[in-house]
Amino acid sequence: MRTLLIHTAWLGDLVLTTPLVDHLRADPDLEALALVTTPAASSLFHRDPRIDELIVYDKRGHDRGIGGYRRVIKRIRAFAPDRVLCPHRSLRSGLLTIFSGAWDRIGYSNSVFSLSFSRMVHYNPELHEVDRLLSLAGVEPNVETPPMPSLFNDPEEAGAARKRLADAKIGHPIALAPGSAWMTKRWPLECWIELLRTMLLDHEGGFVLLGGSADAELCDTIRDAFSAADAARLLNLAGVISLRESFQILRLCRAAVVNDSAPLHLAQAAGTPTLAIFGSTWPAFGFGPRGARDRVVQLTPECKPCGIHGKNQCPTGTLECLRGITSEMVADPLKEMLARK
């Protein structure tokens, strides 16, 4: 069976799709598996042997408009899928399932264009996103051993990451990812600085600051808050390395401290113990860490959650859900995580 997976959402969503990819790949009747996704997310699957064909849909750039949409449809039709799974709930993705020509089209019942599906699956808001995605393939949640996301471990990329840390003389690092696309998901700058002041005394190894180009200035500001001697233990890679290399760096870290953002899911895929700071959103939405060694730090003010996603400004103007989280509230569970073998 030739199977097509359509998911053009955020980076973290694509990382969480990988257990579904593994399940589809294990099907003895699978002939080929193709993935339709965004340019940014496509880099995560570079040389991934689980994906036979990667179809990049640059919906906000090169493929914007009717002409670009037709090009993507042409590539999908050339793949000739028998089955399409569509976790993305937008109108454009729903229409792609129709135009794919596949006889078996599966998606969520609450999708914008659910009529495009030959089979609809209930979107259960109480499940973790990994389990929701797996439900599209009829897989029941595994409570005892929850499936974890994964990315292809490229040996060449792994070697480059080890060399980068060695060249910077950074050993046994802790990863910090202070950024997020949304203001109400970002633990304040001064809190990250205070956390580092504590951890520089209690952790003998180094620290790696991770993020995209939009986070580079934030990470520079954090590093600049320290003396030259302390800053030498802080390696700022935000905006410097690719997503794939960030994943490899995380594999070498003893722990990762993250907001509710893409680095959380990269750390999960890397198998790195993850401490996630949640502000305006809930882990119960299905996007929290789920490993046995992972931890979540959050407050529960009455105004939380103020939305399913983050916001660019706090509706109450207080950012109580994040400003109330002290550095000690993060440092203490982090030290406990590091103490565990």
Image (cartoon, rainbow, N blue to C red):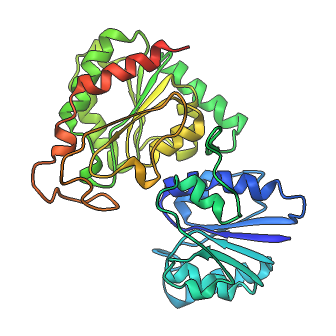
In the displayed structure, does residue 55 sit left or right of residue 207?
right
Give the x, y percent position of residue 237.
Answer: 42, 35
Q: Quadrant of residue 143?
A: top right
Vertical placement of 177 versus 213: above or below? above
Instruction: Tell me the quarter of the image containing the N terminus.
Output: bottom right
Look at 51% across and 27% down and name the residue there: 293
Look at 54% across and 27% down and name the residue there: 164
In this rendered view, identify the residue nearer to me: 5 or 232: 5
Residue at the extreme left of the image, as rendered:
317
Vertical placement of 154 versus 91: above or below? above
Give the x, y percent position of residue 2.
Answer: 82, 71
- Examine the rendering and report whether any part of residue 293 can be seen: yes
In this rendered view, identify the residue nearer to me: 5 or 333: 333
Look at 47% across and 60% down and name the residue there: 10
In this rendered view, identify the residue nearer to me: 54 or 263: 263
Give the x, y percent position of residue 127.
Answer: 52, 55
Vertical placement of 175 versus 181: above or below? above
